[in-house]
Image (cartoon, rainbow, N blue to C red):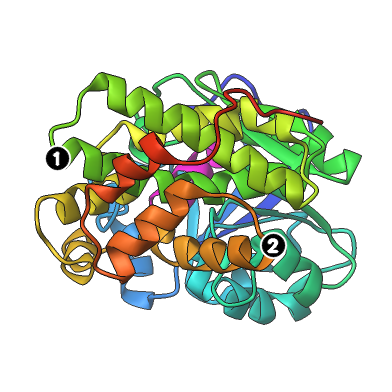
Amino acid sequence: MTNTNSSDKQYRVAILGGGSFGTAIANIIAGNGHSACLWIRDQARTQQCRMTRRNAAYLPDYPLEDTLTFESDLEKCVGKCEVVVIAIPSLSFRDVAKQVAPLLKPGTMVVSTTKGIEFGSFTLMSQILEQELGDVKIGVLSGPNFAAEIVTNQYTASVVASNHQEVLDVIPSVFSSGTFRVYTNPDRYGVELAGALKNIYAIATGMAAALGCGHNTTAMILTRSLAEMSRFASELGADTMTFLGLAGMGDLILTCTSDMSRNYRAGFAVGKGQTLDEAVEQIGQAVEGVNTLKTVKAKADEMGVYMPLVQALYAVLFEHKDISCIIQQLMTGEATTDVEYNR
């Protein structure tokens, strides 16, 4: 079905990453009348998508737009594209950025949708793009977005952030549909940081749910998570007001309260007695919050930022401390101030 909120100009767009979110975004773009090509690394999967018009591995029940093309050859996919979307798990992100770098023409708009931090370096995905790509215009897309609901036309909103006005002008019209709206924010670092951090707290709320904690506890964890995220972000130079928007509060609520979240499910499984490795293996897809937790814990220690939830969750998952310490840490922590937002 063709979308109603299309851009007047037709853009050539490559979407790198054949997971659920990359597929959902590619389908919207194709439905808006743009030339959209979805790059899938595996040639067999690519051919299957061409033949069936479905992504059987991630969105098997949803038929894709007839105009959406599929390609396993990166050069053929990127070609002369004016917009490139990278929807690759954080562990593979730099590798793909290096591969695509020589294929991009100057001024290409490159948008990351990956919510993660490079393990060991505390580098966000847009910063990897700055390091690996040439003269391009970088943006990030983040928000409370489950792909399975996007493709079934559930009303959804996201936010694109960039230092380049052209990205803020073009991406909302190219990506938006009658049921998917994209807002803008100039705070690229804050939007991206929020999208990565919330995965940590989804593991914590999943654990709490497995332990039988009630709504009061969930509300407390969510609220204190938001305060913790903003405190950390402020020390890194982000605008803490960004965390009250879609990429912060919106994504935090979504990810921490739904078993559609892989991070929530991982936490729930651990809360029910599985090891972290068993939980991740059972889910079968990237659980970004695990490596993000390690990276953020190290950075918080280095900077001296008070993050009791991060500290407690790390102790449970990697130091094998009793799981009840997450709640105890909240009840006995040193912070007493409720609202901590400052620009």
Q: Nearer the viewer, residue 180 or 72?
A: 180
Is 161 or 273 nearer to us in this picture? 273
**Residue depicted at x 47% and y 27%:** 223
Q: Is residue 57 visible?
A: yes
Residue at image coords 44%, 57%: 311
Res 51 quadrant in image: bottom left
Q: Amino acid at mark 1?
A: Leu
Asked whether residue 173 is in view, the answer is: no
Left or right of 89 on screen, residue 164: right
Q: Nearer the viewer, residue 5 or 218?
A: 218
Which quarter of the figure is the C terminus placed in? Answer: top right
* Residue 211: assigned label: 1
Name the residue type under label 2.
Met
Quadrant of the image for the N terminus? top left
Q: Residues within 10 Å of mark 2 (few under 14, many from 20)?
A: few
User: Where residue 285 appears, x then y in whole percent?
Assistant: 30, 62
Q: Which mark is residue 97?
A: none
**Does residue 162 sit above or below 278 in this rendering?**
above
| Vertical placement of residue 59 versus 128, above or below | above
> What residue would you read off at disc 2?
303
